[in-house]
């Protein structure tokens, strides 16, 4: 059993090719991330990307660098790992430190990656991912009708066929824009992310109108604290509801399942790592809920780590593993997207190459 000998974190900045806007005033124009590197006694290394989002999790690049160095790494150094459950048990110890979602999520993924490398296993085999093709979606930023259309056009040319359109700032105008997109791209599918912006009294009517246009589902229509209203919305509207912000953690998910407030869970490995993400997927299966995998506006590294996990048989919706196309990243190692799908061998090759290129950086 190899022991954990070294954990370090380094800032990792990438500009975006274009800004991402969502919700009531949120904006992202640059990825100010953190690379977390884990080394085992036998020399095996794992690298993962922490994605601080101050307006979502309260983390910053500086806070992640501090929490890893001063609080998260010390309890793990010297511990031995011999399988998925041993890493999950180590990650569970970090619950002592509240919040810090993406710092803990990235550390967990780096630990699992290092152990898979130590054992000489493909990450997909280590995680139990059996799909050879992963259907992927892309995020379309809020904005003018022309900007949204241009974003969809570029992504369609890049091979994407499922689009998540940010929604809720100008409902009538956005419904009109989405209707035109559905007509213009008959081979594509669209869903919306309201980022908690709709009003409880009108949300069902809005979503039913979108459903009649052909929109597949909606992510987080209402503010997450309106638990009873969200449960009622699911009963009143014909469109399936995606849980995201309402289910950051296992305890959050347990509450949402108890209230039966959603149909599909967006599991973001960037905030729940592989350990919690696997348990979340099991809980969805037990509750007869569908699942997709998100990557939290990650670079190529984070998207590929999410895509490998999306190869789980229980992941039955298109997963958001293509945000790297929006980053001004080195895309020499980016896998091809063909008719909306990534091939698992391409994903693993890409992940290996990206991690190799970052070993010295991290």
Image: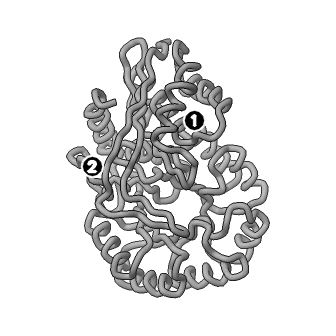
Location of residue 175 with respect to 65 vertically, above or below: below
- Residue 282 in percent (x, y) is at 64, 44
Residue 33 placement (x, y as % from top left): 41, 43
Q: In the image shown, does 348 or 139 lie closer to the viewer?
A: 139
Q: Is the residue 74 above or below the residue 234 in the image?
A: above
In the figure, is residue 283 to the left or right of 13? right
Image marks 1 and 2: residues in contact by CB distance under 8 Å = no
**In front here: 290 or 249?**
249
- Specify few, some or many for label 1: CA neighbours under 10 Å numbering under 14, 14-19, or 20 or more: many
Residue sitting nearer the eye, 99 or 177: 99
Q: Nearer the viewer, mark 1 or mark 2?
A: 2
* Residue at x 70%, y 70% (from the top left corner): 234
- List the residue tagged with mark 1: 275
Examine the image and state in which quarter residue 197 appears: bottom right
Q: Label 2: which residue?
A: 329
Query: Of the residues under marks 1 and 2, which one precedes in the sequence?
Result: 1
Dot 2 falls on a residue whose secondary structure is loop
């Amino acid at each position: 059993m190899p022991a954990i000998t070294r954990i370090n974190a380094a800032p990792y900045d990438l500009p975006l090719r274009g800004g991402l806007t969502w919700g009531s005033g949120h904006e992202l124009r640059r990825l100010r991330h953190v690379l977390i590197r884990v080394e085992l006694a036998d020399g095996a290394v794992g690298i993962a990307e922490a994605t601080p989002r101050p307006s979502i999790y309260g983390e910053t690049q500086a806070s992640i660098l501090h929490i890893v160095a001063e609080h998260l790494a010390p309890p793990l150094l010297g511990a031995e790992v011999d399988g998925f459950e041993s890493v999950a048990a180590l990650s569970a110890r970090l619950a002592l430190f509240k919040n810090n979602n993406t710092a803990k999520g990235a550390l967990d993924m780096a630990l699992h990656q290092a152990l898979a490398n130590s054992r000489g296993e493909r990450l997909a085999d280590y995680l139990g991912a059996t799909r050879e093709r992963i259907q992927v979606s892309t995020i379309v930023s809020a904005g003018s009708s022309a900007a949204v259309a241009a974003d969809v056009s570029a992504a369609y040319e890049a091979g994407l066929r499922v689009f998540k359109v940010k929604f809720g700032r100008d409902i009538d105008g956005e419904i009109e824009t989405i209707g035109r997109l559905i007509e213009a791209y008959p081979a594509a599918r669209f869903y919306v992310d309201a980022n908690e912006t709709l009003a409880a009294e009108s949300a069902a009517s809005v979503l039913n109108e979108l459903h009649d246009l052909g929109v597949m589902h909606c992510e987080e229509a209402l503010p997450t604290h309106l638990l009873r209203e969200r449960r009622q919305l699911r009963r009143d509207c014909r469109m399936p509801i995606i849980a995201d912000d309402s289910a950051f953690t296992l305890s959050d998910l347990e509450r949402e399942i108890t209230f039966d407030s959603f149909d599909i869970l967006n599991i973001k490995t960037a905030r729940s790592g592989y350990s919690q993400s696997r348990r979340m997927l099991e809980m969805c299966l037990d509750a007869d809920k569908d699942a997709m995998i998100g990557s939290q506006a990650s670079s190529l590294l984070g998207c590929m780590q999410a895509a490998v996990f999306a190869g789980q048989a229980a992941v039955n919706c298109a997963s958001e593993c293509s945000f790297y196309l929006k980053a001004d990243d080195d895309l020499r190692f980016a896998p091809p997207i063909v008719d909306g799908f990534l091939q698992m061998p391409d994903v693993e090759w890409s992940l290996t190459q990206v991690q190799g290129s970052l070993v010295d950086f991290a």
